[in-house]
Image (cartoon, helix red, strand yellow):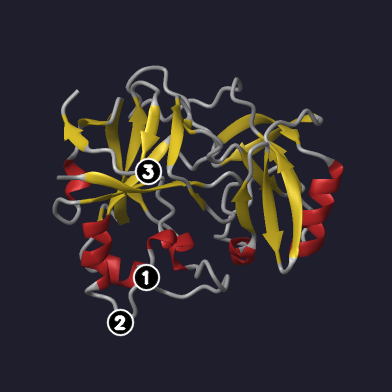
């Protein structure tokens, strides 16, 4: 039996994730997942690819807000914000976002040593997924390209058997981790159900240097990309995990069974 073993949200793009026992599935992805991000002075999104120290910002979940923790300090991130509207860029997409507050932007700028702003992405604002992989008029949050990412624990186990030092799942920042099944079987999934939720698996996830950042220390290495390149590379890209589009919206829970078919 295949079942959900972990559910993760990453409220601020490229900062620490939060494991949750359940989550609402929304058209753009899990509730609160990547609805905020940091942008530089030119409005371009910031990630651990260029700023690996972003991994050191950890989040916790409260009933009405998140707390962001860094080196013994913290700041509250409210679920909603109504700051000034501006345009930002995520890869090739231009999106309309709101600055959370000047205080939040200054807090991050001081700790990262880079002038930046913390912005939110309202649920009603548009950002279509790549039409080559869209099922309908699908939308995505501030995630790189698709609403959700799923990875089988067996896939990580297979990789770790090949590594000198095993790595945790947080290197790959999935939303859903499942147990049961064969390594990398998610590569070939199509339509499937988890609880009352229906999903379409639309594209294997190509991986980048962010996976080489230790999420506890913020330091970069070479693994897992070096090893993955020996057996998970095609068309000059390295794949690990499967991108998903939700076909309907319900509650996703740890322990939910995964069933093939619509």
Residue sitting at x 24%, y 44%: 3
For label 1, the SS is loop
Residue 91 place in picture, x, y as percent? 54, 42
Other-residue count near label 1 (Cα within 10 Å), few / some / many at <14 / 14–19 / ≥20 = some
Percent position of residue 191, x then y: 21, 29
Q: Is residue 113 visible?
A: no
Residue topped by disc 1: 167
* SS class, disc 3: strand
Question: Of residues 112 and 78, which is closer to you in this image?
Answer: 78
Tell me the distance, in whole angstroms, between the alpha carbons under discs 1 and 3. 18 Å
Question: Is 163 displayed left or right of 143 in the figure?
Answer: left
Q: Quadrant of residue 56?
A: bottom right
Q: Which residue is mark 3?
A: 149
Question: In the image, what residue occupies the spot 30% across and 54% down?
Answer: 240
Classify residue 212 by image quadrant.
bottom left
CB atoms at circles 1 and 2 under 8 Å apart? no
**Figure quadrant of the N terminus:** top left
| Callout 3 crowding tier (Cα within 10 Å): few <14, some 14–19, many ≥20 | many
Query: Which of the marked residues, 1 or 3, is nearer the chain's N terminus?
Result: 3
Q: Earlier in the sequence, mark 2 or mark 3?
A: 3
The reply to whether the C-beta atoms of the residues labelled 1 and 3 are less than 8 Å apart is no
Which residue position holds label 2? Answer: 164
Q: Position of residue 63 (x, y in %)?
A: 63, 38
- Is residue 126 shown above or below 229? above
Residue in view at x 29 percent, y 71 percent: 227
Marks 1 and 2, how far apart in space?
Answer: 9 Å
Name the element at disc 2: loop
Q: Residue furthest bottom?
A: 164
Residue 103 disc label: none
- Judge from the rendering whether residue 169 lies leftward or rightward of residue 98; answer left or right: left
Q: Residues within 10 Å of mark 2 (few under 14, many from 20)?
A: few
């Amino acid at each position: 039996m295949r079942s959900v073993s972990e559910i993760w949200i990453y409220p601020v793009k490229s900062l620490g994730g939060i494991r949750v026992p359940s989550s609402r599935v929304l058209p753009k992805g899990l509730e609160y997942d990547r609805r905020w991000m940091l942008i530089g002075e030119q409005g371009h999104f910031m990630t651990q690819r260029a700023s690996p120290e972003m991994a050191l910002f950890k989040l916790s979940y409260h009933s009405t807000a998140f707390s962001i923790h860094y080196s013994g300090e913290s700041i509250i991130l409210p679920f909603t914000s109504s700051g000034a509207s501006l345009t930002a860029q995520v890869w090739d997409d231009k999106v309309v976002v709101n600055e959370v507050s000047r205080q939040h932007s200054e807090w991050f700028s001081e700790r990262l040593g880079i002038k930046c702003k913390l912005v939110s992405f309202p649920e009603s604002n548009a950002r279509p997924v790549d039409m080559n992989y869209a099922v309908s008029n699908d939308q995505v949050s501030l995630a790189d390209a698709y609403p959700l990412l799923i990875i089988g624990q067996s896939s990580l186990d297979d990789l770790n058997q090949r590594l000198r030092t095993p790595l945790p799942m947080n290197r790959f920042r999935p939303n859903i981790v499942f147990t049961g099944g064969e390594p990398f079987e998610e590569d070939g999934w199509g339509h499937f159900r988890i609880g009352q939720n229906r999903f379409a698996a639309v594209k294997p996830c190509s991986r980048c240097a962010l996976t080489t950042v230790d999420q506890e220390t913020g330091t970069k290495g070479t693994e897992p990309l070096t090893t993955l390149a020996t057996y998970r590379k095609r068309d000059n890209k390295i794949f690990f995990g499967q991108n998903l589009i939700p076909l309907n919206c319900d509650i996703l829970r740890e322990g939910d069974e995964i069933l093939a078919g619509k």
